[in-house]
Each structure stands twice: as C-alpha cells, then as structure tokens.
Amino acid sequence: MYQIDFNHPVHVHFMGIGGISMSGLAKILWEEGFTISGSDTKPSPLTEMLSAMGAKIYYGQRASNLNGDIDLAVYTGAVHTDNPEYVAALEMGIPLLSRGELLGQIMRNYDLPIAVSGTHGKTTTTSMIAEILLKADTDPTLSIGGILKSIGGNIRVGHSGYFVTEACEYTNSFLNFFPKVGIILNVGEDHLDFFKDIHDIRRSFHRFAALLPQDGVLIVNGEIPAVDVILQDLPCRVVTYGSDSRFDYWPREISYDEKGCASFLLGKKSPKGTDQGSLPEDLRISLGVPGEHNIYNAMAAVAFADRFSIDPSAVCQALAGFHGTDRRFEYKGVVRGATLIDDYAHHPEEITATLRAAAKYPHRSIWCVFQPHTYTRTKAFMEEFAKALTLADHVILTDIYPARETDDLGISSRDLQQKVLQLGTDCHYFSSFEETENFLLENAVPNDLLITMGAGDVVNIGNSLLTR
C-alpha cells in the first residue's frame, strides 16, 4: 500500500474533493506542502476554499482530469470502479487509496493519533476533545465531521503530535487507521446495507479496538451491551466510563440548567501505578450543550483529558464554552416567535436523545420535521423510528432522502406516518419542502420549538423559514 510521508510531499488527486472529509484531508496535505488537485460534480464553499488556497479543482469527473504529474489518487466510497477517473488512474499506474486508507496513512505522521468511534456522538465528542486540546494550547491537528465554530471549519492543521479524528465504522473504514488512543462511545445497529447484524458490527468494533498497540489506550463506554465481545484479548490498556462507580469514570450529582445543559461532579477511580491523572475527583463540570447523552460524550472526553494530564481549568472552560457543531442541536433563529433548532439525528437512538434534550429546553410544543435517511435504514428501523418520534408533540415527515441508494424497497414516508399515527402522535406528511414550510407558518405559535432533523437536506426548510 502507498505510504504518505510528510517529509516527501507529492501531487495527490482527490476524486470527490468537495466532501467534508475529503476536503479536510486535502487541506491537511496542502498545509504540509503537497500539491493538490481534485474533482467534484459542482462548486461548493469547500471546493471554492480549496481553489482559493491554490488547489486545481475540476467540475465533472473525466479521465482527462488526470495527468502524468499525479503521484497518488484518492477516492470516496461514492466512486465506483467504472468511474472514468478511477479507470484512468488504473490505466496510468497511479497508486490508489480510499479516503479511509489515506486518513490512516496521515495518522502515522503524528505521535498521538486519537480516533473517536461509535454509532452516535462522534462529531460532538471529537469536537469536545478538540476544544479541550485547543484550550490547553497543545496546537493539535483536527479532522472533524462537522463545522466547529472555534476553528471556522472542520479542519485545523497544528504543529504538535496531537491528531484527533472521527473513526467511522461504515464499510469498515476505521480498520485502516493507526490510533494510539481509541474511543468507543456506543455500538448499535446501523448501516445494515453493509453489516449483516449487530454481531457483525460488534466484531468490527473489536477489530478496531485491536488496532491499538500495547502502549495505547482504549476509552470505552462500559455500558455498551455485550461489551466483553469488543474488549476480549486486547493488547492495550482499557479505561471505562459509565453511569456509576462500577466504571473508571462516572458523573455524580447531575443537574440541568434552564436550557437542559448538565452540570455534574466528576467521579473517578485512581488508575493503577503512580499516574493519578490530572483531574481531581469532585471536579465540577458544566456543559454548554443540552441533553443527558452529552454527559456521556463529555465523560469520554474527560477520561481522555485525565489520562493525558490536561489542565483541569482547560477541561472545564472548554466544555462550558462548547455549544455544539453545525447541525447538532444548532440554534438557527426565531420564526414568528417559535425557536428553530436543526439537528443531524437520523437513527432512532439519535432521535430519542435529541428529543429528550428538547424536552428540557424551553418550549410550548415540540414540532419535529423529520427527513428519513436512506430506504435501507428506514425499512430496518420503521418501528423504532415511529416510537422515537412520539417524543415530539407534532411530527412532520418529508420524503425519504435516498443518499447513495436507488432502490426504494417498496416503502415511503407515508408508511412511517401511519406507524406514528397508530402510536397516538399527531403526524403529517408533505411531498414538498414548500408545503411543509407553509404548514408550519400556519400552525406553529410563539414559544413552540421547531426542530428540523435528518442527515439530508432538511436543513433547507429551516433556512427558508428564516427568510419568510
């Protein structure tokens, strides 16, 4: 396999350079002196940013975009073997790496690569760790799956040994990584268009954990069902967190403010040996993001900070000042007196966590505008989606966002609507965003909470409402 070496920059071409992850990797390499080119279907703020930096961007993927000066071509999961650029790279003998393989290669150039994995919460937890390292003046390199306001994007190129990234399990991408610190937040059923079942998913997370070297550290939610399957025969040190003193780290005396943001005392066991960690027991930690689920995202970040001797004041200030990334319970504005929030939740467990957080947020009624994401996921979790959505007072469904899928599997959002109605919750379906916007403007009242939710383009509904 081709090996990226920061000491010997080369010309790298990205097929699908406009994606948030691919554009971020391109920026890291550009900052390290590499020559960057790439292609995508249409201009975007990310491609325009790269072009302004000096990268050569092509719109439309054609064999002619590649030339003999290219030393390495990188492709995303959306690029298939019949893609003209992929075919041209093979014919020209240009080495190829997947996005995950490239990210793994980049990690090898840092002393302390940190990979945050889990079915849910990766972006938030990665961002929390990023904020802690920034506040502690460690000058980290960051690769985040969302826009972090404090760095003005999803990528920051630092000059220390710290490298922090999300580690996605889809297509086993994270098995290409080389972490020294691994974090597993949760393990649940998802991406069943790739994985066979939950047992297959657990095996994948075990293989990820097994990538850690003997001097590495795995920080894991000890309450993951069947966690022993994931932890068996690991060479590294294992650190656990959870809800009580059975684990190495846990929150105590939890309380919530008027916007549903938690505050708690740190509970911890003293680690074996002379290293007692940097954080005192009973440290008061207050969060700037709402919801019980974010307590446990924060516990993973706190466990990391303690094990790597981060200053307690940096930890407290970072977590109190972190108010989320784009599309994670993001406050968007006010629409005729109703508060507008946007959230990326697209799995039943994520929806449950978000709506429970919303219940603690000031509101009269909760309106959830949900766009199901992929036919495969919607069909697999139809009952679970319906149950989760009943935590809202009113539900509005849009058409299913197909993403990479072309087969609708004979289902639609109307099927989900019927399930929600059967459970006794008000639920409406509209085939267009305009109809959804008009309905909300007619029916939502001041002090209601409007949440646009999903991993597709449902965010555009809220953006449009703010202009009307």
Image (cartoon, helix red, strand yellow):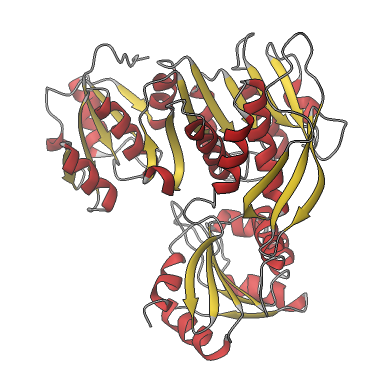
| Quadrant containing the N terminus in the rendered view | top left
Instruction: Point out the residue furthest to the front here.
Output: 313
Query: Relative to the observer, which residue lies in front, 347 or 112?
Result: 112
Instruction: Point out the residue furthest to the bottom here.
Output: 442
Q: Is residue 205 left or right of residue 224?
A: left
Query: Relative to the observer, which residue lies in front, 336 or 413?
Result: 336
| Quadrant containing the C terminus in the rendered view | bottom left
- The image shows residue 442, relative to residue 41, as above or below, that is below
Query: Relative to the observer, which residue lies in front, 432 or 34?
Result: 34
Q: How many marks?
A: 0
Q: Is residue 388 left or right of residue 176?
A: right
Across and down, in percent, residue 59 comes to 18, 48
- The image shows residue 299, relative to residue 455, as above or below, that is above
- The image shows residue 182, relative to residue 436, as above or below, that is above
Query: Relative to the observer, which residue lies in front, 428 or 171?
Result: 428
- Residue appearing at x 46%, y 28% in the figure: 137
Q: Quadrant of residue 362?
A: bottom right
Q: Is residue 188 left or right of residue 245?
A: left
Residue 62 in view (yes/no): no
- The image shows residue 158, relative to residue 283, as above or below, that is above
Across and down, in percent, residue 212 comes to 60, 16
Across and down, in percent, residue 266 comes to 76, 36
Q: Quadrant of residue 84?
A: top left
Q: Quadrant of residue 75?
A: top left
Across and down, in percent, residue 252 comes to 82, 42
- Residue appearing at x 58%, y 56% in the figure: 346
Residue 23 in view (yes/no): yes
- Residue appearing at x 28%, y 37% in the figure: 15
